[in-house]
Amino acid sequence: MKLSEFRYIAPKSNIAKFPADPRDSAKMMVLNKATGEMEDKTFRDIMDYFQKGDCIVVNETRVFPARVFGKKEKTNAKIEVMLLRELKAQERIWDVLVEPARKVRIGNKIYFDNNKFYCEVVDNTTNRGRTVRFSYDGDLFKVIERIGEMPLPAYIKRDPTEHDKETYQCVFANPNKTASIAPPTAGLHFTQKMLKELEAKGVRIATVSLNIGQGIFENIEVEDLTKHRMYSEYFEITKDNADTINKSLKSKKNVYAVGCSVARALEASVLTTGAVKPNKGWTDKFIYPPYEFKIANRFITNFHPPATPSILLSAAFAGKELLFKAYKRAIKSDYRLFAYGDAMLIINE
């Protein structure tokens, strides 16, 4: 498979700038891999597909407002700093992206919050990437929550608002898992009411945690997909949650993966028996066609930008030809695309 096979033209008018309100009012296309059938639904209709004993797996990671703005020492040049991941908590060392990168060199200091603290650049990692050490004495996340902006993707083409701190966050996000710079966007459509209804219906809800990081903004630079390497992301699957998923697998019930991050975490944690193992660590799992999924047989996702890891994973689940037929139909039917856009349920059984 070549990267160019996964390109398409996404009309600007279809790219969602704001989320559906309420969350579950988004459109949902249901795609059946076995029959090739496509149906147009509303996301709340997904409740009709769940049966007692099924398992839905969600990523409970929480997004933090990772885009902060500071001023470079001496010149006072405005610098945007995107916090990617904390490398050494005790030393307050982070991987970040900076803009404009040409103005930020090793040894430079960038001051934040009216010069109350700064970060010093200690290394260059990529063209825009830097490793920095923060001077802040205390809980850095608290001040970031106050001064930072939600890191909306550039294609949304608007400034983030305070409201995005709520809407660019899944209702099942765990405050103790604050580590991502993007949400599992497929999960944005769920409401608390829906989760309660699933539990009442006898559906098992399992959580994994995968810190969505720089990979969400990375472009694939190689035409030969076998040569692409994903940005590593930290994930955890506890024993209790692995057991919950395995109960549904053992009883031959459906397992729903909510988003690409969940699918990657599950596929990085498969035992030879076909069960999920408790697992934690870093994964650079890159899934593209052809690929046989071992755990989930149903996949909830969004409509993704062309030639991205997310559309490749979706194509691996649905089949490339069927997926692109669905995208063509979605664009003609005015589905809303990308992070704040509409949903897709892919049934693979």
Image (tube, rainbow, N blue to C red):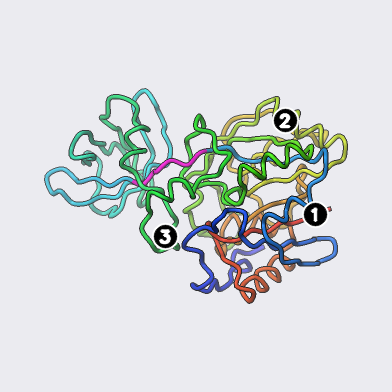
Please state which amino acid type lies under the numbered disc 3: Ala
206 on left or right of 297: left
For label 3, the crowd category at 10 Å Cα-Cα, with few meaning under 14, some 14 to 19 and many 20 or more, is few
118 on left or right of 264: left
The answer to which quarter of the image holds residue 244 is top right
Mark sitting earlier along the chain (1/2)? 2
Instruction: Write down the residue under mark 1.
Output: 348
Say if mark 2 contacts mark 3, CB within 8 Å: no
Magenta segment includes 262? no
For label 1, the crowd category at 10 Å Cα-Cα, with few meaning under 14, some 14 to 19 and many 20 or more, is some
Q: Residue at x 56, y 64 (%)?
A: 337
20 on left or right of 65: right
Cα separation between marks 1 and 3: 32 Å
Cα separation between marks 2 and 3: 36 Å
Residue stretch rendered in magenta on the structure: 62-67
Instruction: Write down the residue under mark 3.
Output: 154
Mark sitting earlier along the chain (1/3)? 3
The answer to which quarter of the image holds residue 195 is top right
